[in-house]
Image (cartoon, helix red, strand yellow):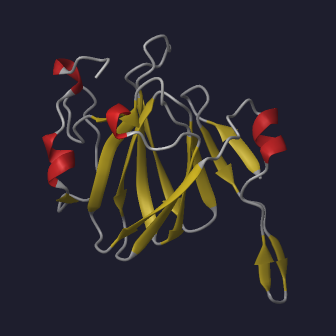
Amino acid sequence: MIFTETKLKGVYIIEIERIDEERGFFARTFCRKEFESHGLNPNVVQCNISYNKKRGTLRGMHYQIAPHEEAKLVSCIKGAIYDVIIDLRPDSSTCCQWITVELPAPFKMLYIPEGFAHGFQTLEDDTLVFYQMSEFYHPESARGIRWDDPVFAIQWPIHSRIISDKDKSYDNWAVKDKTR
């Protein structure tokens, strides 16, 4: 695997290294030792899959607060996504900065450490997203901020969006109690 750190400390784009042969290819997508050698949280306690019927589906921006903050390893196993993360770590030099990464299936992953909000928009119909999580889902710690919050001004690629009522109901970051 090839680990490339982004401008947000602790966030990595991880590309698989294919071993091609006559039947197709083989590639490793996770290795505890490699994650530890890069200072990444290697614990995986839960894996989730998100199926998205339509291009333009937007999910986010989600995170969990302490004591249940979570690291995520996100990959697209069918289709492609425009993945977005926002650094919400109050002591980070990049707090409130965000990046986007296009994740086409299945050759690129994004490692998101604890303390980040995460969301994505599908770039194709019938997109499958696979998440490996370092913490169990705890509804009492689950939080979100608006996908269109003017504090961040995220530029989403597709203007015709499918968004859940729950994701539409989140507050903007500027009015949010940061512990909630």
Residue 50 appears in the rendering:
yes
Q: In this view, does 26 lie to the left or right of 77?
A: right
Residue 155: x %, y % from top left: 28, 44
Seen from the viewer's position, the closer of residues 25 and 35 is 35
| Quadrant of residue 58 within the rendered picture | bottom left
Residue located at (68% from left, 41% from top): 43
Residue 91 higher or lower than 138, as above or below? above
| Quadrant of residue 66 within the rendered picture | top left
Residue 91: x %, y % from top left: 48, 10
Residue located at (74% from left, 29% from top): 39
Residue 157 appears in the rendering:
no
Residue 126 higher or lower than 168, as above or below? below
Residue 145: x %, y % from top left: 26, 34
Residue 167 higher or lower than 116, as above or below? below
In the current view of this chain or complex, which residue is farthest to the top? Answer: 91
Q: Is residue 152 left or right of residue 107?
A: left
Residue located at (47% from left, 27% from top): 115
Seen from the viewer's position, the closer of residues 163 and 64 is 64
Residue located at (75% from left, 40% from top): 35
Q: What is the total number of numbered labels drawn onto the structure image? A: 0
Residue 108 higher or lower than 148, as above or below? below
Location of the C terminus by quadrant is: top left
Residue 8: x %, y % from top left: 54, 28
In the current view of this chain or complex, which residue is farthest to the bottom? Answer: 22
